[in-house]
Image (tube, helix red, strand yellow):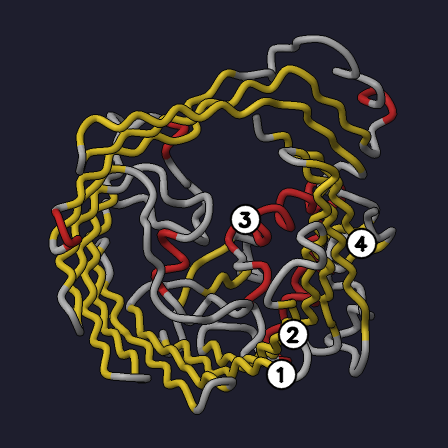
Amino acid sequence: MLRDEAFLNPANQLNEKYASGHFFQVIYGDITLSENLFFQIGTRVKWFGWHNGMDTDTIGVNLYGITENDSFDIENWQLTYIWPEAFFSMGIGSLPWTPGPAKQLKAANYFEWLFGEEKNKTLLWSAFTFEQSSIKFVYAPRGPWVPESFLENSPSILPGSSIFYSQGQFFAGSLDIGLFVSWDNDWTTGGWASYMIGTDLLAYGEASYTTKNWMPLLDSSNFTVTMTRKNGIRTMGGILYSLPLIDLSFYFEVMYIGDAYDKKEWENLTQTLSTANSILGPAAAGVRGSVLQHMRWSYMSPWNYALHLRPNSSLFNILKWSYSIRYGILGDFYSRVDLSFKIFEGVEFLFLWDVPFAWGEDIGGRGTEYFLYEQRLKLSIQVTL
């Protein structure tokens, strides 16, 4: 459900959809080529779709049948080789490892920006794993020869250049320390550390520095977006606590983003968008769209806080759930409920509900309507044969 007067989308100038649905099938094929060599391919066929938007001419269009928008797509393919005792491994496709224990606030972890969920399609990786350490390398090629379905082109996530990434990790008892460096026409470096205190408390932190221009600024004279950088620093810290008497884990995290809007910059953006509306009229929707395209949506506030709750095991081996609440843009909170209910073996019902709500001060006269959506609901059924 869209907000009627969202700060960045008044009167739905961006023509966002109120509802959309897809019915598709995903097929995976796994092949064991030898004792240490494995291959997997995944394809998706979308054969039903519908959407409802503000434009009444489009309501009901594509309600039934195959359309030109339906597609057959190779979602991913993977080839993995593992040396005996896992001393050396290499592969093409998704990565089998993710550094750092952060659960909600991922922006301090550069690895998540580049190789997190749904951004890991064309990767070449290798790893050397020792008893108390490891060294890992990733190459993410970009170019016209890479299949389009393997790319992630969002300007706020990937720069469009080939990425070279390496990391070293060291384990000593309850201590886990990692360092990384990455190059893709810009340098990014950082690290993470975690330490287990007793059996129920984990403390962890991440930090990074980049030469990238991540922060979009809207020019008040010509209404074009330019990217800039304040200090390139991102840091976060958190704790994970598992209650000894209840099967429940708490994750509390705090993050600082150097390249984000402070209160004055939000006020300047509000004023510039207001000026664009008065001068450009309906064409101002393109200005807002340009801002949104370059904005890291959830990370445009210097300080972010999050609390994440989830049980350590499913209820009766049927129900899994988690709840998150996050504070970011001044005066706005964001909550999420995630449920997975196993109807019977091989069939799961999935429920995802996002609800933003306001609390606190007004920023630049924008009211409390920063988010495009008043709430978002996602329902799906997953069938595994």
Q: Residues within 10 Å of mark 4 (few under 14, many from 20)?
A: some
The CA distance from mark 1 to mark 3 is: 41 Å
What residue is disc 2 on? 248
Q: Is residue 51 above or below residue 253?
A: above
Dot 1 and dot 4 residues touching (CB under 8 Å): no
Dot 1 and dot 3 residues touching (CB under 8 Å): no
What residue is disc 1 on? 243
- Tag 1: residue type? Leu
Q: Image point 68% across, 27% down: which residue?
A: 22
Mark 2 vs mark 3: give the one in front: 2
Dot 4 and dot 2 residues touching (CB under 8 Å): no
Q: Which mark is residue 191?
A: none
What residue is disc 4 on? 375
- Tag 3: residue type? Gln
Task: Determine whether the residue tagged by mark 3 lies in a helix, strand or loop.
Answer: helix
The CA distance from mark 1 to mark 4 is: 31 Å
Q: Earlier in the sequence, mark 4 or mark 2?
A: 2
Q: Which mark is residue 293?
A: 3
